[in-house]
Image (spheres, grey):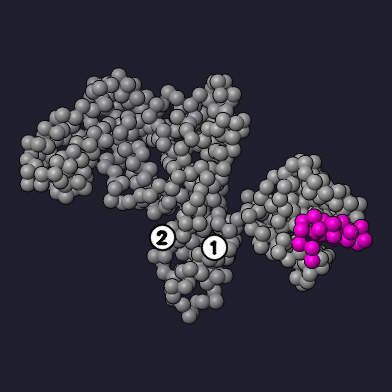
Amino acid sequence: MPDFATCRQTMLLYLKARIPFISLRTDERDRALELFRCMATDLNVPIYHHTLSQGVRDITTNRVVNEDRSVAGALDYASQQILQRQNLTFILTEVQDIDGDTPLSRQMLDVASSATERGGAIVVITTSSIWPRLQRQGMTLALDPPNEDEMRAIIAECLSPYRGSVQIEWGEPELTEAATILAGVTRIEAENAVATFLAKGSILKSDLAELSKVKDRIFSDIAGLERVKTSAKEVTVGGLAGLQAWLEKQRPLLTMDLRERGLRPPRGVLLVGVPGCGKSLSAKAIATSWNLPLYRLDLSNIHGQYLGQSEGRLKEALSTADRVAPCVLWIDEIEKGLAGSGGSSDGGTSTRLVGHFLYWLQEGRARVFVVSTANDIGKLPPELFRRGRFDELFFVDLPNHAERQEIITLYARRYMHRDLPPAMLSDLVDISDGFAGADLDAAVAEIAKEAILKGDSTIADAYWHTVFSNIVPLSKTNPEAIESIRAWGRERAVPASGQPMAQETGQPKARRSVLV
């Protein structure tokens, strides 16, 4: 991703080489114009820029040189001046309708052709594609939003005038963390965020948590992604000690600067296993405990009816995820979106989606922690399990005795606001052998509903026993499918419980598998 310094160096070479047509891809017009002001100073050449509100102005003195505010008028003026003078550069900041063969794109092609002979240059600042015939006349360059180093300098510059007059608790570590959080937004958006904090009269260390919410509001309308609201009270996960211990080690690495060692931030985890055992809940719990925004990508909704539409939607969604980083990206039931990658019934769309997703997963460097869940393991493309894509593959099994005790206690406190007597809890744990976490949730929720209707005092211990006994878990209604899933997990994944998975005989099998 070209930062400001890299973009400036490359643009300097383009202007020295007198490339006749240059398209600069960026969302930040003001930051791009700042780059060209540097160019005018470095090269000591006249550079002019056009806006629809002010016409054509000298970029250094801001003097109006042509009052015609239309793009066509600006091109006419540029054509006249290029024929009369050499080494002129004209920048167009608000150009539309040049992505195809249109009168405006042909006019621009004619001016660029004239610039070739006279050493002139036409620069277009845009976010749109360019008519290929026009683009082949020159070069393309991108100016991305400030990276972490640039963002840190921007934040420090904003705070510097107020140190001493305003309470500012941000030191070097806080500046680095703030830069990590705001990386991906534009310079003006970052300046607005810092100014908002300054307006309240102080900037505290605790404001770093609020900074993530500010960024979330900037990207409140995100194409292809769904913002998921989470609450610590609602997403507590019982059991899964092995997964939770692994996540604790990964959390600091997500915001550390790992570039010196050539490492990328943690990329994510793939959770496979028995339905209803907490895979989706884990994604919410990770975002909540890490104090990061959670976005859900529904791959099944990515598919479009037109050629290339599905790939375009996926690229846009993943690109947006990179911009809102650091964040947690939850892909629920990933097999539904990536299924059929080996077939030709969809014209190869699924294959292309898998290829683009795996490339982004392996090569991306944004601080996006991906939590993918899967139930139907047979539909997952084998390439997904290769090392370098996800950091780890965990199998979420039916909760064991100790985990069921923890989960029942958790739901009893959440729904009934009480702890169960040890003997009663032990009885419920025995009855619930084979239950998934969702089954335990449903059982205690049913008891809580009865308590709301009739009062807590009417709920006898025997009623708990009756409700739990009436639950028929999936492990009993479809035991063959569940055992098939568990057999796969024993051979290929790390147990999320942190304990070896029990085999059919009930004996533990001490095996820790890795991704294949």
Residue at the bottom extreme? 165
- Asked if residue 128 is positioned above or below residue 299 in the image, the reply reads below
Question: What kind of element bears circle 1?
Answer: helix
Tell me: 79 left or right of 464: right
Which numbered disc covers residue 209?
2
Tell me: 340 left or right of 103: left
- The answer to whether any part of residue 500 appears in the image is no
Range of magenta residues: 67-91
Which of 93/55 is in front? 55
The residue at which mark 1 appears reads as 190
Q: Amino acid at mark 1?
A: Ala
Which of 457/332 is in front? 457
Q: Amino acid at mark 2?
A: Ala
Instruction: Determine the residue positioned at 23% across, 28% down.
Output: 473
On the image, the x and y values in percent for residue 349 come to 57, 28
Residue at the top extreme? 480
Instruction: Determine the residue positioned at 9% across, 36% down.
Output: 463
On the image, the x and y values in percent for residue 409 come to 18, 44
On the image, the x and y values in percent for residue 450 come to 14, 41
